[in-house]
Image: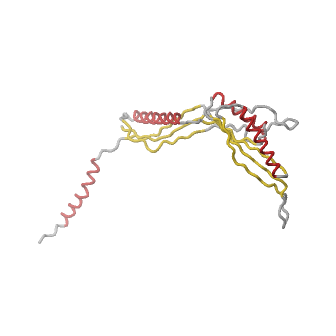
Amino acid sequence: MLKPMPKAAGMILAMSLLLIPTLAVAEQPLERVISTQGHGEVRVKPDSLSLNLMVEATHAELAAAREENNRKMQAIIKSLKALNIPNLKMETQNVQVYPMQGEYVKNQLPKTLGYRVTNGLRITVNKADPKMLASFGSRISDVALTSGANHLQGLGFYLDDMTQARRDALQAAVKNARENAEAMAEAAGLGISGVHSIEGSPMYSSMMRRDYAATETTLRMRGASGGVVNQNLPVELGEEIISSDITVRFKF
């Protein structure tokens, strides 16, 4: 028959068993890393533009309102095609018909006084010469207004293909992260020996510059007779900024 282990001996054995994994963990070398962030950005000239316009017509009869709207839109499309701007595309959007009703009278349905018909057109020019892009935007805006457009909205410039610019921004961000880590290591009397990890997926942001010189009906520059003055709207082309931010851990 086995004799029970003395109480003191049991306690020593238990402490030994607890100590074994603790010592094993303590023997593992600590990771020597510097964690830092990197930011990179590139500036490029846009090569594309987009513009939304709308034609509005009102009349007591629905057929007349539709006919006027169609006539104006056809005139706009014809005039824009006559500009012969390379890669100019047009897409009809958001055709709507609204009944215009009179004042509400108690216990009576409001009378329909007429109809408002609206028709939107989205215009884009892709992969154009950046030197000509501002001129294209000005000419398109002017022709649209003089041909019958009631509203111009969101004249904007952008880069059609950002693949290379994004790559350049990412490379600049990694370079910036290394420079930051090397500066910290040098201040601590250390040296960078390699990359431990790059955390997360790089996130890109693009700051599209928009020129809102032609956003509202009030920009229909009218003379004394009420006609649209044939004067090009001023359009300035800026730069597009593409940036990237990442986190890198470097060994030392």
Colouring used for the render: secondary structure
Using residue 45 as the reference point, say whether residue 187 is left or right of it.
Answer: left
Q: Quadrant of residue 218?
A: top right
Q: Quadrant of residue 136?
A: top right
Using residue 75 as the reference point, say whether residue 204 is left or right of it.
Answer: left
Q: Residue at x 26, y 58 (%)?
A: 18
Q: Position of residue 21 (x, y in %)?
A: 26, 54
The single residue placed furthest to the left in the displayed view is: 1
Using residue 86 as the reference point, say whether residue 177 is left or right of it.
Answer: left
Q: Position of residue 209 (x, y in %)?
A: 63, 37
Q: Residue at x 64, y 27 (%)?
A: 131
Front residue (pair 2, 127): 127
Front residue (pair 37, 57): 57
Q: Residue at x 51, y 42 (%)?
A: 203
Task: Give the number of marks.
Answer: 0
Quarter of the image containing the N terminus? bottom left
Quarter of the image containing the C terminus? top left
The single residue placed furthest to the right in the displayed view is: 225
The single residue placed furthest to the top in the displayed view is: 131
Front residue (pair 16, 49): 49
Q: Position of residue 184 (x, y in %)?
A: 42, 36
Q: Position of residue 137 (x, y in %)?
A: 69, 34
Q: Residue at x 49, y 36 (%)?
A: 170
